[in-house]
Amino acid sequence: MITEMKTASFKQINDEKWQEAAVKSLRGLPFEKLITKTLEGIEIQPLYTKQKFDKELEAHDEMLNAVRFGMESPDWTIAQRSYSSNSKQFLDEVKESLEKGNEAIVYDGRQPFSWEEADLKELSELAMNHPIYAFNVDKDDSFAKLFETIAESDRKKVKGAVTGSVALPEGYHLIRKAYADTIPLHEKGADIVTELAVSLAKAAEEAVHYDTFTAFSNQFFVRFAIDTHFFFEIAKLRAFRVLWQTLAKAYGHEKRARVPIISETSLRTYSKLDPYVNLLRAGNEAFSAVLGGTDVLTVHPHNVLGEVTPASNRYARNIQLVIKEETHVQYVLDPSGGSYFIDTLTNEMVTEAWKLFQDIEAQGGYTAYASSGALDEKLETLYKERLDQVGHRKKSLVGTNNYADLSTPIEASEETLHVEGRLSEPYENLRSSFEKSQPKTMLLTFGELKDFKPRADFVTGFLAAGGIKAEQSPAFRTVQEGREWIRNNHFDYGIICVSPEETEKVLDELIEDFPDEKWIDVAGKYDEQAEKWQRAGVSDFIFQGQDQLGKLKGLQARWEEVNHR
């Protein structure tokens, strides 16, 4: 037996044979059913193999070199920000976080407050020992006085990056001030190709203000938000490294070119519903940013859309600390390099982003492109497509459009951050509406539990996403029993749940004397019978693949109409 095992051989399986087997398993469906097309126009294949990879990526080594040339170190800076509302609290939080693993000072001028002179003085001492990243700083923001507070002889010790209209005094040679911030576009729905192309277009506009490309690249940095699309976000950061090398060569810069990538977890993915799920999103996004080679990373707390607490700040910081302590990824340069899947994605993103960048340049550059309205139009289209994916549950937002937890109400505290374009916001609005007032909703069940339970569970989860709590009727053994119960019991809204095999039989008998004064839907999709049943009094249907948001908003509108009678 052992001898046979040692001498056993296996038939070599190539891509063609694998595809034949895959097609057979699809039972008549085309192979293309296994291919997923993304918003970027990239087709995700069901299998990535060396055979296919070697054919399509002849310049693979060149791409890998471009990725790695752009990475100064596999390590990154933990840059957790403060969400405080006054200078004393900000300073206390920064000092505590630096003691517990944070490695930078981060300030965002979108939530400005007045700074005390003594607090600025103490912060200036910290800034000489820790990098400072100050974003969206207006020239009138009192935080800007920090840079005047530091003595000119000490300014060479301060490093980091600044965005906004603030003008820095002389002497801050290690603070980068030229940038491409793609986060506002990301929050409005931008896809990865658009983010990459716009970052290059903004860079091209900034570069004209410098004598040499070297001088420019020494001042430039880029900001990206990292979404939950794990492998795509890894490829996004790697693709930027390749694109930057390509841009540098276009300017005649043949030497290694690198600029810092400053990342943060994506707030468009965060939800006020079941906010602890945001911890999972943040962990996913942080790890993909690290594997993609970010230089600086901020992880937003899970409850940043409500009231940030010391505990949530600690959880957010610890996500990065755990990644460093448990994975040791900071010792590996380009850890995802060599994956057929990720390298292929990287190459496709480079190709598509460079095409779009050239198109933007042909239209006169970034400012002309944005002023024409083309960018806003594209972002609006992308946002609608994303919302459509969420509404049809092609994209799952756990705790929001799937597996909603009605036992936890929406947090009533004021927002720490308001983010335009969050995908969960329409669901949050529905939940808020139905928390104030909702119909008494009843699942009208016919037959055996094992037969109607799958549909009853589906409807319960479907409605819970909008904040509607469904109760279950007795299991009716006959249609007559169900008809009498429906007539004699009060409820505002009912959904008939029957096994797929029995629905037509039950409904055809029920509509002979349908209680048409009641608001009743049917679970399941029945195109041919729908018109007949609706003429008899059935209101509508709930089914898999339906526009969940549209359906829930329709229920909300009808319930409001009932309440106003």
Image: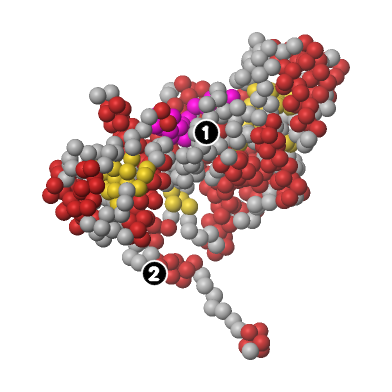
Q: Which residue is mark 1?
A: 272
CB atoms of marks 1 and 2 within 8 Å: no
User: Hey, what amino acid is under mark 1?
Assistant: Lys
What residue is drawn where x is 83% and y is 21%?
Answer: 125
**Magenta residue span:** 416-434
Relative to 196, is 538 on the left or the right? left
Q: Which residue is mark 2?
A: 24
| Image quadrant in which the C terminus is located | top left
Q: Residue at x 66, y 19 (%)?
A: 85
Can residue 67 be seen from the camera position used here?
Answer: no
**Image spot of residue 506 (x, y percent):** 21, 55
**Magenta highlight on residue 427:** yes
Residue in the foreground of this view, choosing between 460 and 39: 460
Measured from the top left, where is residue 323 in percent x and y? Answer: 71, 46
Q: Residue at x 77, y 10 (%)?
A: 117
**Residue 75 is a magenta residue:** no
Instruction: Sort mark 2 into few (<14), some (14-19) or many (20+) by Cα contacts within 10 Å.
Output: few
- Looking at the picture, how far across and down is residue 310, in whole percent? 69, 31
What residue appears at the point 12 percent right and 49 percent down from the top-left corner? 512
| Image vertical order of residue 443 relative to residue 20, above or below | above
Tell which residue pokes out farthest to the left in this image: 512
Nearer-N-terminus badge (1/2): 2
